Amino acid sequence: MKKFASLLTFSVLTVFALVVLFPSCEGPEGPTGPSGQDGINGTDGTDGVDANSFCIECHTLDNKNAIKTQFTTFSKHGNPGFELAYAGGRNDCAMCHSHQGFMETTMTGRDTIGTAIPIPVGLQCETCHDFHMTLEEDGFPDYALRNNKPVSLLVDGHATSIDVKGSGNVCSYCHQPRMQAGFPLVPNGTDSIAIHSSHWGTHYGTQSVILMATGGFEIPGSLPYESTAHKTSTDCATCHMNKDGGEGVGGHTYRMKTIDGVENIAACTTCHSSATSFDINGVQTEIGELIHHLEELLMEHKLIDETGHAIPHSADNGLGRKFTSNEAGAVFNLLLIHYEGSHGIHNYKYTKALLTNTIEMAEAW
């Protein structure tokens, strides 16, 4: 036992010497010497280019769903109903009344489609929007509009083009009057016009030409054919897509009034700070009275019926008669302004001149 204790003591002392004493018995420093001081930090490199994170300002699920609700719930464009079923597949209507027709005619440059569309589809996001032409931030916002080039007008057989500020050409492609029998009408012309349909006239959606102060039957009269500042200072989206008027107006509803008739005055007050309604300075009231006066004159001369439609000529039943160029032009101007719908807001000066000069002509018959 005594021998075992001595052996254990020796083992412990040996381990202690190996762990503690031996490492402390180092020789002299090596040839490299002690470590020097840390050097000065280098200059930071240039930051890399950020990714296109600005894309998500628009391309979020919440934004997409909000736009879809506006478009399909409040806008006639996204909820066309009868117009799509009746006109969406027709050769001379599909250009504006279906997605397929719009896409085809913008590609071919024709006014009609090649063949009837058996199952027309309503307007989609892709109808107006294409891929972005650039993904550089300094090129935004371009909204990837599919067809924003100047619009060649149907009404005079494409003799005239308009170029609406901003994104207005996309709207003007469809919101323009159509070609009709007897065009181009010549003021004081000697040709007679045979009107065979009560729907002769401008068709609907004539806003673009009124905004741009062109396209009317410009009979000489007491007022010159001038334009308000809207022609150069604004575009369709500035007002019709203004989002400050609350739910049911602006944005992708394109509406200037709610379904209940509440006006989106916020679209006007940026420039017309004192406006409380669309009837700024009584413009809409004045234009409305001129429209009514012209309607009465044209009914008196048996050019339109009580519904405001042209009275067609029919040799078979003796109804109606052929119109002179000035008579047809007077009916055209009435319908142009009636279907434009703004009662002077889009272009007060041009609208008033068309109505006033046409009334003066009709009063002299």
Image (cartoon, grey):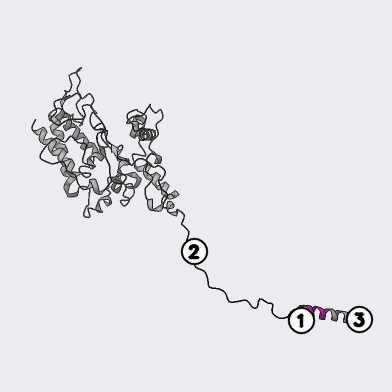
125 inside magenta stretch? no
In this picture, residue 304 sits left or right of residue 93: left
In this picture, residue 234 sits left or right of residue 40: left
Mark earlier in primary sequence (3, 1): 3
* Measured Cα–Cα span from mark 3 to mark 2: 72 Å
Q: Which residue is drawn at the image coordinates 88% and 79% (left, top)?
A: 7
Question: Which marked residue is nearer to the observer: mark 1 or mark 2?
Answer: 2
Question: Which marked residue is nearer to the observer: mark 3 or mark 2?
Answer: 2
Residue 304 lies in what quarter of the image? top left
Which stretch did the figure color magenta? 12-21
Q: Which residue is drawn at the image coordinates 27% and 50% (left, top)?
A: 267
Q: x, y (%) of residue 363? A: 9, 33
Residue that numbered label 2 is attached to: 45
Instruction: Provide the major secondary structure of the magenta segment.
Output: helix
Kind of residue at disc 3: Lys
Kind of residue at disc 2: Gly
Residue 21 is tagged as 1
Q: x, y (%) of residue 57? A: 41, 53
Kind of residue at disc 1: Leu
Please identify the residue farthest to the front as the structure is shown.
Answer: 31
